[in-house]
Image: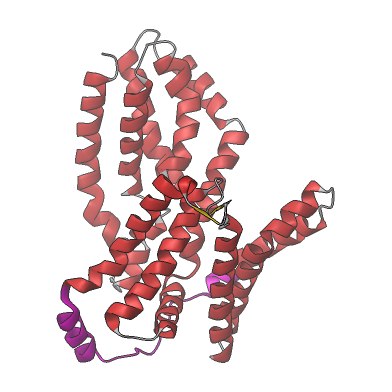
């Protein structure tokens, strides 16, 4: 049975490999950062098990390691690694392979989708092949492994070259690779700390009674603002739905939950286009393309975000109360 724990262990193995390569190259700060992160991925189950048994020491050690990661992060300055092939050789290889280059990339969403849809029906020797909890994430991990083998086959290159290129990419991204994990945790912290309830109380105090339009506008703008703060519309969504969406728009004004949820998320995605906190979308491409302005991607997207928000809000206002 394939479980999500195997995905974490595989990630940990890759992080240890990255740390080892950096240590060999005397990049000790980088090596320490990736090694600590690898230990957190590898030991997560142990920490949870010990905490459930009443032993909080492993969790406290893990918290100290997270603080150490934050202290090490400023040391991870971007540094170019030696290219494995010249620019002319890469261009010649790309021309030779043509559209076959897209095959490994397209296999990732395809295999993930197949596992999400069919995984619970697959078995081997009478045992379910995939564990139901977090099956989609397990499928994503399997898809990445399949894509690695496919890339090696398409490019006629050894597997170790793919792993080495993955390490080079991870070093280029640096600490920003952790932002999606940290921002997802931030969303949970906001929800558990009662931010949604505070927003609801504030909105009911400020918004005029019976004005559904203003309430909807505050909800849409709040989705954008919290996404800018958190860097992730999925983290902003539970906060805004708990604060304004459900108690005011749905229960008081009779808004359609399906339309409000789907189009509210689209408003949040407009915030994704505007924030450096969404590092995987906005900072990482700038780093990989070596743009002069690290915020060049955001500047290029700003007007698109504004236009999409206005159109989305108008359509949502026209449909959500019908």
Q: Quadrant of the N terminus?
A: bottom right
Q: How many numbered discs sit on the rendered protein?
A: 0
Say whether residue 92 is magenta: yes
Q: Residue furthest right?
A: 54
Q: Relative to residue 150, is residue 156 depicted above or below?
A: below
Task: Please tell me in which quadrant of the rendered image residue 162 appears.
Answer: bottom left
> Can I make out residue 180 in this image?
no
Q: Position of residue 145 (x, y in %)?
A: 44, 68
Between 21 and 212, which is closer to the camera in this rendering?
21
- Coloring basis for residues: secondary structure
Between 158 and 290, which is closer to the camera in this rendering?
158
Q: Residue furthest front?
A: 125
Q: Quadrant of the C terminus?
A: top left
Between 285 and 110, which is closer to the camera in this rendering?
110
Residue at image location 19% in from the left, 79% down from the top? 97
Residue at image location 24% in from the left, 52% down from the top? 301
Between 265 and 132, which is closer to the camera in this rendering?
132
Say whether residue 153 is magenta: no
Residue 12 as seen in the image, left or right of residue 288: right
> Which stretch appears magenta?
72-98
Q: Relative to residue 71, is residue 16 depicted above or below?
A: below
Residue at image location 67% in from the left, 59% down from the top? 44
Residue at image location 35% in from the left, 70% down from the top? 287
Q: Residue furthest top?
A: 210
> Can I make out residue 289 in this image?
yes
Residue 259 as seen in the image, left or right of residue 52: left
Q: Position of residue 98 (x, y in %)?
A: 16, 76
Task: Please tell me in which quadrant of the rendered image residue 318 appears.
Answer: top left
Residue 12 as seen in the image, left or right of residue 225: right
Q: Position of residue 128 (x, y in %)?
A: 55, 51
């Amino acid at each position: 049975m394939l479980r999500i724990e195997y995905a974490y262990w595989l990630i940990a193995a890759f992080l240890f490999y990255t740390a080892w390569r950096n240590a060999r190259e005397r990049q000790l700060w980088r090596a320490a950062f990736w090694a600590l992160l690898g230990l957190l991925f590898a030991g997560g189950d142990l920490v949870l098990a010990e905490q459930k048994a009443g032993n909080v020491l492993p969790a406290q050690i893990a918290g100290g390691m997270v603080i150490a990661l934050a202290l090490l992060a400023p040391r991870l300055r971007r540094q170019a690694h030696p290219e494995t092939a010249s620019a002319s050789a890469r261009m010649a290889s790309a021309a030779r392979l043509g559209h076959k280059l897209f095959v490994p990339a397209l296999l990732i969403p395809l295999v993930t989708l197949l596992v999400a849809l069919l995984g619970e029906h697959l078995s081997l020797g009478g045992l379910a092949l995939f564990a139901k909890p977090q099956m989609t994430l397990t499928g994503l991990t399997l898809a990445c492994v399949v894509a690695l083998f496919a890339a090696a086959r398409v490019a006629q290159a050894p597997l170790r070259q793919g792993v080495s290129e993955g390490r080079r990419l991870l070093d280029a991204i640096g600490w920003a690779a952790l932002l999606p994990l940290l921002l997802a945790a931030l969303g949970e912290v906001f929800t558990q700390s009662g931010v949604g309830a505070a927003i609801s109380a504030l909105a009911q105090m400020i918004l005029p009674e019976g004005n559904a339009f203003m309430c909807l506008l505050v909800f849409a703008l709040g989705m954008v603002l919290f996404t800018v703060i958190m860097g992730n519309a999925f983290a902003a969504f539970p906060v805004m739905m708990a604060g304004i969406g459900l108690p005011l728009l749905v229960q008081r004004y009779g808004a359609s939950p399906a339309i409000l949820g789907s189009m509210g998320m689209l408003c949040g995605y407009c915030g994704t286009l505007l924030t450096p906190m969404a590092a995987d979308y906005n900072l990482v491409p700038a780093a990989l393309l070596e743009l002069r302005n690290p915020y060049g991607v955001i500047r290029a997207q700003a007007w698109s975000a504004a236009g999409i928000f206005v159109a989305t809000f108008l359509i949502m206002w026209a449909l959500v109360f019908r």
